[in-house]
Amino acid sequence: MVYLVAAVVLVGALGLTNLVLTLGVIRRLREHTELLANRVPPGPSIRQAGETAEDFTTTTVDGRTFRRGDFADGTLMGFFSPGCKACATQLAQFLELAASWPGGPDRTVAVVMGAAESSRALCEELGQVVGRVVREGEEPVVSLAFGVNAFPAYAVVDADGVVAAGALNMEALPIRATA
């Protein structure tokens, strides 16, 4: 009988220890999940005001050559990726802004990062409003020129490729000051 009581106490103590440790692990996992969800890449995710984009030459989805020297003053740029949830959330806002942007389609550019098959629909949707759409796959020349390391990213650029404003979301882009 003594052995039975000792065994029950031992099993109960082990179960309680297991429960406490499991609750601690769950709490820590929740903290890590929250940290990862709110993680912003270190440093700016796109060139900031006053910085100049590096030289680049690429081709738009409709076959036109596009260079850094092709910008007009006050060009609106958007950088997107097809699997990006934030891109999908902010796309309608970008399209609405691009449709009413001063200078029309000639002053709007969209850059889509992704393989042709995964980014085709996004490129087509952007192409209905935006003047120039660039699809970047293995050679992200425009994204590298603008120092983009997170999506979506937005910029307003002058004719020399100097960034007037850069941001990771539409709300942070000081549109009124640059449009």
Image (spheres, rainbow, N blue to C red):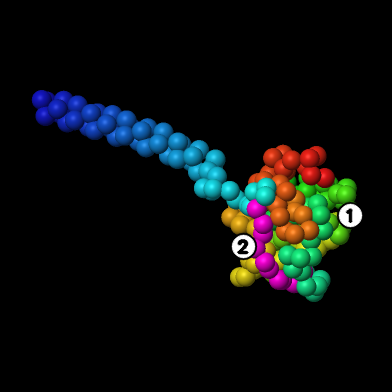
- Residue 49 forms part of the magenta stretch: no
The amino acid beneath tag 1 is: Gly
Visible residue check, residue 101 = yes
> Badge 1 is on which residue?
104
Report the front residue among 6 and 86. Answer: 86
**How many residues crowd around disc 1 within 10 Å: few (fewer than 14), some, or many (20 or more)?**
some
Give above or below for 113 relative to 43: below
> Badge 2 is on which residue?
144
Q: Secondary structure at mark 2?
A: helix
Q: Residue at x 50, y 43 (%)?
A: 36
- Residue 57 forms part of the magenta stretch: yes
The amino acid beneath tag 2 is: Leu
Visible residue check, residue 83 = no
Q: Residue at x 74, y 40 (%)?
A: 174
- Residue 64: image quadrant is bottom right
- Residue 123: image quadrant is bottom right
Magenta segment, which residues? 51-60
Gap between marks 1 and 2 measured at Cα: 26 Å
* Relative side of 147 to 21, left or right: right
- Residue 63: image quadrant is bottom right
Determine which of the numbered discs, if any, sits on residue 146 in the image.
Answer: none
